[in-house]
Amino acid sequence: MKIEIMKEEVVDNQLHVKIKVVLRRFIRERKEYFRTKDLVERMISKGHKIKKTVSGADNILANTRSAGYRQEALWIFDLESKPEKKITPRKKTTPRKKTTVTTKKNIRERMSKIAESPKGK
C-alpha cells in the first residue's frame, strides 16, 4: 500500500500527522487497511515517543472506496515530555601544588657522599 505523510509536525508536545492513502488501480491488487497501530509503529520507528492518541483513534484508511473507507485522515498524539536535566554547580578545584624536580643534588647529599668514600680514590 502506498501511503503519503502529508503533514507531520509537533505543536505543544503533540504530534499532528495527516496521512493520505493512494487508491488501488486494478481489481487484482489487494485491499489493504491502515490503522492507528500501524501509524504508531511508523512514528516510533522515526524516533517519536508517543504517550497516547488524542484524536483519530477510530480512523481506518483503505486503498479502496468500498464500504465507506476514507483515504485521508488526521491523527493527534501526545508525546512523552523529555525530563529536564538538573543543573548542578561545579565544585571548585583546588590548585595543584607545584613540585620541582631537580637533577642537581643538594649540598648535604654531596658532602655525605664524599665523607663515605674511601680517601684513596
Image (cartoon, rainbow, N blue to C red):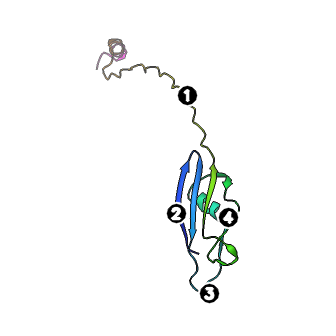
Q: Disc 2 and disc 1: Cα gap in Å?
A: 43 Å
- Residue 59, by quadrant, is bottom right
- Sequence-wise, the earlier of marks 1 and 4 is 4
Q: Residues within 10 Å of mark 4 (few under 14, many from 20)?
A: some
Q: Is residue 116 magenta?
A: yes
Q: Quadrant of the N terminus?
A: bottom right
Q: Disc 2 and disc 4: Cα gap in Å?
A: 16 Å
On screen, residue 11 versus residue 60, left or right, reads left
Residue 19 position, x and y percent, is 57, 64
Residue ID at (43%, 20%): 95
Q: Disc 4 and disc 3: Cα gap in Å?
A: 24 Å
Q: Element at badge 1?
A: loop
Residue 21 position, x and y percent, is 58, 71
The one nearer the camera, 52 or 60, is 60
Q: Element at badge 3?
A: loop
Residue ID at (65%, 76%): 32
For disc 2, the marked residue is: 6
Q: Which span is picked out in magenta?
A: 112-121
Q: Is residue 118 above or below residue 14?
A: above
For disc 1, the marked residue is: 88
